[in-house]
Amino acid sequence: MLGTLRTHENTRRIERLIAMNRAKILGVTVSRQGERIIAAVRVAVARPQQAGVAQSDSTVGIDVGVRRLATVATTSEVIGELANPRALEHRLAELRRLQCQRARRTRGSRQYLETAATITRLHAQVAHLRRHTIHVVTTTLAKTHGVVVVEGLDAASLLQQKGLSGARSRRRGLSDAALGEIRRQLRYKCPWYGSRSIEADRFFPSSKTCHTCGHVQDIGWSEHWTCEECLSSHQRDDNAAINLARWAGLGSVGAPVKRGAERQTESHSAAGDDTRKGSPTPVGSNNSVRSAA
């Protein structure tokens, strides 16, 4: 038994909604992050879909990567760039020093446990910085633009590449950037705020397609390249973001490669089938699910 827990967020609003039969607690997940015990409360809340998108007629494409965490562009120009915080890379030297220090300790000793706790806190700080950065950018995108197009990367396959020069450091950089997390958060945040999220086909060659003439060519890992047809110069991430923004108008029919499937959010209950067990929750036809720790 854990007994009484103190919550970080104020729970009075949830209590009022439950008393008015407008909310229902679906479950509580207790987890440990570093030295902290986190109790995440899953709640289905009946509330109207927010239609306060700042630019409801705006369509943007989001290209994610390691050089830049995200590049935001319309169908004609780049409007924003988010630098990669490289949370793990900046603390890697400190992590290696602590791991070497722990290896010299006697397992189970006081000093061993103290060093292990320091390593645990470092990992938690890295994860919190990475999560905070991604939450800020995804919330801003969902609240600002009516249509957000994000590339459907197969992040798991990217982490399995072997035999390339620097493949180990490249896989560590991909894990540090958490490229799939931006797409995952946009899936549920866009319906919250009244915008729409579209996932482009994972085989759509957004980086190697010239947004000026549409020519597709092999560019390898080059950051800057020149189109062989129209001689236009492109930056890899900028070009990909513009092509992704145009995907909303092309769809899977106009894509140069017609494999995979377009994934698109619909304006339905964000709780949906996630309530799983038991009878459907009686909180209303337009529900949403939030987690409070």
Image: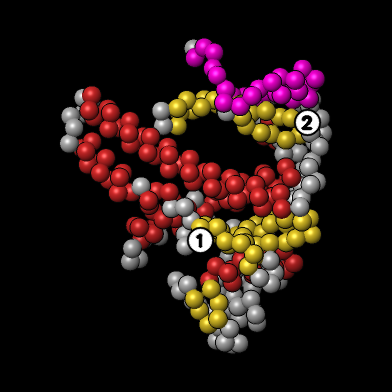
Quickly name the residue at label 1: 68
Question: Which of the 4 image quarters holds residue 72?
Answer: bottom right
10 Å crowding of disc 2: few (<14), some (14-19), many (20+): many
- Position of residue 214 relative to residue 280, above or below, is below
10 Å crowding of disc 1: few (<14), some (14-19), many (20+): some
Disc 1 element: strand
Residue 141 lies in the magenta-colored region: no
Q: Amino acid at mark 1?
A: Arg
Query: Which of marks 2 and 1 precedes in the sequence?
Result: 2
The structure residue drawn at horizontal position 49% and vertical position 76%, both measured from the top left corner, is 224
**Left or right, residue 107 beside residue 69:** left
The structure residue drawn at horizontal position 54% and vertical position 47%, both measured from the top left corner, is 133
Magenta residues, start to end:
2-28
Quickly name the residue at label 2: 46
Q: Quadrant of the C terminus?
A: top right
Between 273 and 152, the residue placed more toward the observer is 152
